[in-house]
Image (cartoon, grey):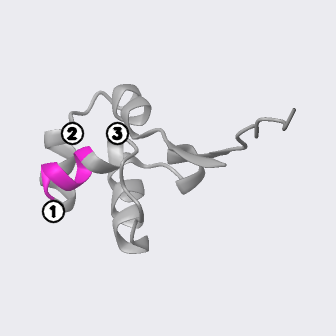
């Protein structure tokens, strides 16, 4: 199972750069880049709330859960 971060899609829809988002919410560009690329291992609720407020969206629009198929044993 995996969590897909759709921050890039939301930024594109809002015509906003990652740098602009970083300046609006006070989170470093490096940390937002880690989140955007899906390499983050955790996200604080306060960070998620700030992103949602700046992008005027809901958490479910930024995050998606996908089941991964396990390989069957032969």
Q: Earlier in the sequence, mark 3 or mark 2?
A: 2
Task: Tell me residue 28's x, y (percent).
Answer: 13, 57
Q: Quadrant of residue 71?
A: top right
Report the residue marked by disc 1.
26
Q: Is residue 17 left or right of residue 65?
A: left
Secondary structure, mark 3, is loop
Q: Position of residue 2 (x, y in %)?
A: 60, 48
Between circles 3 and 1, the one closer to the viewer is 3
Is residue 22 inside the magenta stretch?
no
Label 3 and label 2: CA atoms lie apart by 12 Å
Residue located at (34% from left, 66% from top): 47
Q: Who's the residue at 42% across and 35% down the image?
A: 10
**Neighbours of disc 1 within 10 Å: few (<14), some (14-19), many (20+):** few
Q: Position of residue 61 (x, y in %)?
A: 55, 44
Mark positioned earlier in the residue sequence (2 or 1): 2
Checking the image for residue 37, the label placed there is 3
**Which residues fall within the magenta stretch?**
28-33
**How many labels sit on residues?**
3
Of the residues under marks 3 and 1, which one precedes in the sequence? Answer: 1
Residue at 40% over, 65% down: 43
* Residue 19 placement: quadrant: top left
- Any magenta on residue 31? yes
Mark 2 vs mark 1, CA separation in Å: 12 Å
Alpha carbon distance from label 3 to label 1: 19 Å
**Tag 3–tag 1 contact (CB < 8 Å):** no
């Amino acid at each position: 199972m995996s969590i897909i971060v759709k921050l890039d899609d939301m930024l594109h829809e809002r015509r906003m750069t990652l740098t602009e988002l970083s300046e609006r919410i006070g989170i470093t560009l490096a940390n937002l880049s880690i989140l955007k690329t899906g390499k983050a291992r955790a996200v604080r609720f306060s960070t998620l709330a700030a992103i949602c407020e700046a992008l005027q969206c809901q958490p479910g629009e930024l995050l998606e859960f996908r089941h991964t198929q396990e390989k069957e044993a032969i």
